[in-house]
Amino acid sequence: MTNRYRIDELVDFEVYPLDEPQSPKYKSAVIDARAQLGNDGCAVMKNLLRPAAVKTISEEIVQRKSSTHFSTSSMNPYFHSTKNPEFPDHHPVNTFIERSSGFIPGDSWDSSLAIDALFRSEHLTGFIRDALETNAVHCYADPLAGLTANILEPGQQFAWHFDTNEFAVTAMIDEADQGGLFQYVPMIRNPDDECFDKIQKVLDGDMSEVKTLELHAGDLQIFRGRHSLHRVTRVPRTSRPRHAAIFAYTAEPGVIGRVERTRQLFGRVLPAHEEAERLRVRSDQLID
Ligand SMILES: O=C(O)CCC(=O)C(=O)O
Ligand SMILES: [Fe+2]
């Protein structure tokens, strides 16, 4: 299937000319994103999507909402749900908070859709690469986790957590009219220090270091989620649902997720996951 959408129909090229990396507008967008990322690991490109693109993608999400995998669990910030006796009870590893949101999986979309055109656009990945000052950005090849939509129905929330991947790209499509706010504590941990004490304070309700993002429909967010604790606050029962498109990228091409985590997030695995696991085991282990 060929894609019906051109990237300049979806992205506001007057403000973000992604096809002209040498233009002053492109350069200033990159400088701005780098400054925001350097400040607190988060950059927001306001109104990057055209209003018509937001509407189209919203319809694409709503049409596929029945395929959302909702997996309500009580989890710690590291996505575990069982008590670890090696740590005290009052400790981030043993602090469990409700996560009740769900994801529309990657195999619900097809290549005729606007959301798919955006995710796979080389102009967009080029901009993300420039903003992150990294060598390469490839679409996460995982058939379920690569392109998803995060769905928060009224009453649901996404608890405090760290991401596994280094960074995430989110396009806000439908805001909740109350709640559903993205909150984060910039760089609360680092590769040398888990900073459990600081994390526990946030889990206990200390909001002094917490930032709340102003994210509106059409905005694109680049976020370094591995070191910054973050959550999406509860969408009240009286609100509209919240829908966000989540684009996952990797530094190397052809990456596929592990079977266990895939099952946890999507409730199933595909042959590609099992195949990748077999190849991984074979290349990792000398004795087979
Ligand atoms: O929906 C969002 O804004 C972010 C969700 C999130 O943190 C995640 O999917 O890991
Ligand atoms: Fe996250």
Image (cartoon, rainbow, N blue to C red):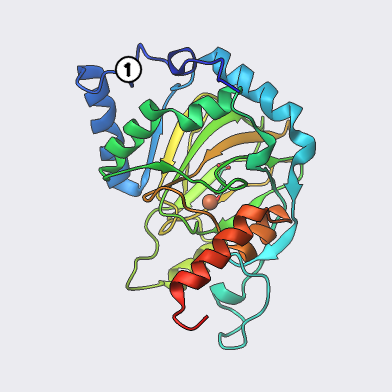
Residue occupying the point 41% across, 40% down: 222
Residue occupying the point 52% across, 25% down: 117
Furthest-bottom residue in view? 86
Callout count: 1
- Residue 194 location, x and y as percent? 41, 72
Relative to residue 267, is residue 50 depicted above or below?
Answer: above
Q: Amino acid at mark 1?
A: Pro
- Residue 144 location, x and y as percent? 62, 47
Seen from the viewer's position, the closer of residues 261 and 168 is 261
Position of 44 with respect to 181 (left or right) is: left
Q: Quadrant of residue 190?
A: bottom left
Q: Quadrant of residue 47?
A: top left
Q: Quadrant of residue 86?
A: bottom right
Seen from the viewer's position, the closer of residues 78 and 121 is 121
Q: Is residue 78 visible?
A: no
Residue occupying the point 55% across, 20% down: 3
Quarter of the image where the N terminus is located: top right
Seen from the viewer's position, the closer of residues 90 and 29 is 29
Position of 202 with respect to 274 (left or right) is: left
- Residue 109 location, x and y as percent? 65, 33
Residue occupying the point 68% across, 29% down: 61
Badge 1 crowding class, 10 Å Cα cut-off, few under 14, some 14 to 19, many 20 or more, is many
- Residue 124 location, x and y as percent? 39, 29
Q: Is residue 199 visible?
A: yes
Q: Is mark 1 within 8 Å of ligand 1?
A: no
Position of 68 with respect to 251 (left or right) is: right
As helix, strand or loop, the secondary structure at mark 1 comes to: loop
Position of 52 with respect to 134 (left or right) is: right
Relative to residue 134, is residue 265 depicted above or below?
Answer: below
Q: Which residue is mark 1?
A: 17
